[in-house]
Every structure is written in structure tokens, then in C-alpha cells.
Amino acid sequence: GEDLVLNSKERLELCRLQTTDSNWMDVDAWEANQAGFNDYHNVTSKLQQRLQFKLQSTLERKMSTLQKSSMVPQRSGSLELRRNKIRVVYVCGADFVLRTGAHKLVNGIVVVDRTLGAPSTSRRSILMTQEGGPITVPVSNEVEVDSSSYPSSPSSTSSSSSSSDESRAIKTKARVFDKLTESYGTEWCEASKHNIWWIPARSRTESEDISSTRIRGLLLKRESCKGLLHPAVAKRLHEKARM
């Protein structure tokens, strides 16, 4: 069908296919296996608990093995078990930023921008975390250009351009927090405003765009998704689109 509607089981299978060849990416089935919808903060909290438990169990097994090993001198001192905390953040598109219940996602939100060419005047990306840092958040029809992400030019390196970018960034921050204050209240925004970063767009041409919208369009047109999807995933979705 034209909508390419997939149930949770199908989505889970495709995600596993997509990450088959990865040595750093994995798929957790908890959310897909739930009977009903779980809000974003519930999903990230549950995943963090599961990963923390798995990590801790692995460390404890390794420590137990080391302590029993004859390779460790009897008077070498205690082997301390470090409790490294795992941090799970929610990743979504810019259109989801105000739907996620950001005030509940204490570990952070990464909002991915997939703009074509230089930063678009109609897109924005933000990262909300609990760590301190600078604020550079584009919103509405204003964008601050990150010169390190794009080839330099006389106009981008001039003092007048820098001044203009700085002025634009100040207006941008004000607009972002007006919108977030409207959604979450002044108290939350005051506590969080120093924990927001803009993640600049990287895609400069259509061939580099990896948005789901583009992939869906290619599938519906029966065009190749080479370089965008794992071959097995593309095959499965092309079959689904023909149904």
C-alpha cells in the first residue's frame, strides 16, 4: 500500500536486518513487544535500566573470575568494581521535539536535522542534556550557521557576517525558549536553558539525505535505496510497497 504501514513486529525485524552487519549498533525489543504505547520517557528509562543491569552483571562476572584467578597475587590489593552509569537519550526528528514530553526525559533528547544544502531556514536541531554547555539552537525561520561544518567563503568569514550570525543566534535562542516555556513552563526552561545545543545539519546534497521521508518516496516510486538501506531491508520494503 502507499502508506507502507508496518506493525511493531515487522519494524523490529527490519531494524534487526538493518543492523546485522554492525559491530556497534544493536536493537532492543522491549518497546516493540509491549501490548500498548509507551511514552518516550518510559522507553528510555526502561532501556537504561536494562542496559545498566546487563553491564553490571557482566562486570561482576569478570571481577569474580579475576578474584579467583591464580594470576592475581594474594596481596595485590582489592579489585574495585566500578559502577559506570549508562546514559540513554531519545533521538527524534525536529518535528517531534515538542511531542516527546522533554521535561520528563531527564537524560536528554537528540533532535536530528536532515537538511539539504546549507542549514535550512525551515529546519532546526537541538540536543537537550543534563550537562552544562553553550546554547546554539535554531528555530522558526532563523538559523545560526556553523562555519566548521561547511566550506568557508569570503562572505562567511567576514566580520559583518559573523556579527549577523551572532545576532541571529540570540534571536533564535529567545524564540526556542518562548516555545518551550509555552509547553513546559518557566521553571523547567530556566533549569534547562544552559543544557541545550544545536546539532548542525550535515547533508549538503540530495544523495546525502537519509531522511525516512526520502526513503519512503523512493520505495513508492520503485526506485533504488542503495546506500540508504541494508539490501535485505530494501528488498523487504519494496515487496511491502507492491502489496
Image: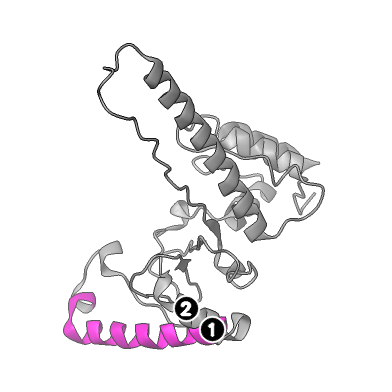
Q: Please state which of residues 164 and 237 is positioned toward the viewer in this rendering.
A: 164
Query: Which residue is painted at 55% across and 30% down in the image?
Result: 20
Mark 1 is surrounded, within 10 Å at the Cα level, by few (under 14), some (14 to 19) or many (20 or more) other residues, namely few
Q: Is residue 48 left or right of residue 42?
A: left
Report the residue that reaches farthest toward the front: 75
What is the C-alpha distance between the residues marked 1 and 2?
Answer: 6 Å
The percent coordinates of residue 227 (x first, y second) are 49, 41
**Residue numbers of the magenta segment:** 156-180
The percent coordinates of residue 206 (x first, y second) are 47, 57
Query: Looking at the image, how many numbered discs can be counted on the residues?
Result: 2
Q: Is residue 102 left or right of residue 64?
A: right
Mark 2 is surrounded, within 10 Å at the Cα level, by few (under 14), some (14 to 19) or many (20 or more) other residues, namely few
Q: Is residue 140 left or right of residue 173?
A: right
Q: Please state which of residues 62 and 119 is positioned toward the viewer in this rendering.
A: 62
Query: Which residue is painted at 36% across and 35% down in the image?
Result: 80
For the residues bearing labels 1 and 2, Cβ distance under 8 angstroms? yes
The image shows residue 174, relative to residue 154, as above or below, that is below
Local secondary structure at mark 1? helix
Residue 45: tell me if it is visible: yes
Query: Which residue is painted at 45% across and 66% down in the image?
Result: 127
Residue 140: tell me if it is visible: no
Quadrant position of the C terminus in the picture: top right
Residue 169 lies in the magenta stretch: yes
Q: Which residue is mark 2?
A: 191
Q: Please state which of residues 41 and 83 is positioned toward the viewer in this rendering.
A: 83
Q: Which residue is mark 1?
A: 187
Instruction: Using the rendered view, name the quadrant where residue 174 is placed.
Output: bottom left
The image shows residue 227, relative to residue 62, as above or below, that is below
